[in-house]
Structures are given as structure tokens and as C-alpha cells.
Image: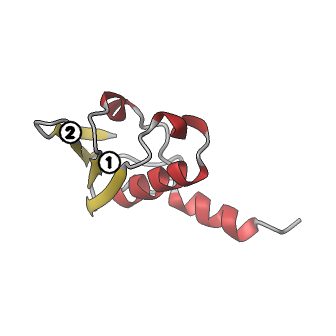
Amino acid sequence: MALSWKASPDQKTWTFKLDPKAKFADGSAVSAEAVEISFERLLKIGQGSAEAYPSDLKVEAVDAHTVRFTLSAPFAPLANDGASIINPALLSKHRADEGKG
């Protein structure tokens, strides 16, 4: 999904440029906002790969295709985890469906 990424000299800030052609299975764009929402959700629910991430991880959508991760200490595995990104439309639908049934 990332066309490029760059780490700060101290390895505490990582900036990723997303491929504008990247799409979720439903055809919607993978945006920096989707990455931000996904990582914030992952850290909030504390499940899956969340335990591997530093609790102070900050994620910011800089623009539509740029996302910045800020940490208090270097964390090299950050560059390898695109599997945690979820389509925000599915999250909204899931929330809307909660309690029905």
C-alpha cells in the first residue's frame, strides 16, 4: 500500500506515502484517514497485534495519502504491518448493526 516511507534519524517518526491506487476489496480507496482510524481502533481494543505496538503510538493523517506515526522509542516492526488496516465503511456498518438481530 505504501509507495515510500521515511524514518526520522532517531527512528521515532515514520512517514508513509500511500499508493493512491490502493483499494479495499469493495473498491474504496485506502486513505491515510483509514490507516489512522484502523491503528487508533487497534490500540483502543487491545486485541490481535495491538499488544506488539507501543502504547504511546500516535498516528496522524497528514493528507489524503500521507500518514505519520510518532513513537517515544524506535520500533522497527512498524514498517511491516499493513494487515491492521480496516475499511472505515465496514467499521461504520458494523457499529450501525450492533444490537440488531
- Give the residue drawn at x 60%, y 51%: 45
Locate residue 6: give its quadrant.
top left
Read off the residue under disc 1. 21
Q: Name the one closer to the observer, 13 or 67.
A: 13
Q: Position of residue 72 (x, y in %)?
A: 28, 44
**Viewer-proximal residue among 47 and 98:** 47
Residue 11 shows in the view: yes
| Camera-side residue of 78 and 21 | 78
Q: Residue at x 40, y 52 (%)?
A: 35
Residue beneath disc 2: 5
Mark 1 secondary-structure assignment = loop
Q: Helix, strand, or loop for circle 2?
A: strand
Q: CA distance from mark 1 to mark 2?
A: 16 Å
Question: What crowding class fits label 2: few (fewer than 14 Cα within 10 Å), some (14-19), or many (20 or more)?
Answer: some
Within 10 Å of disc 1 (Cα), the crowding (few <14, some 14-19, many 20+) is: few
Who is closer to the viewer here, 88 or 80?
A: 80
The single residue placed furthest to the left in the displayed view is: 9
**Mark 2 belongs to which amino acid?**
Trp
Hey, what amino acid is under mark 1? Lys
Decide if residue 44 is on the left or right side of residue 35: right
Marks 1,2: beta carbons within 8 A: no
Tell me if residue 29 can be seen: no
Q: Earlier in the sequence, mark 1 or mark 2?
A: 2
* x, y percent for residue 62: 24, 61
Q: How is the image coloured?
A: secondary structure
Where residue 48 is drawn, which disc sits there? none
Which residue is rendered at x = 60% and y = 60% of the image? 91
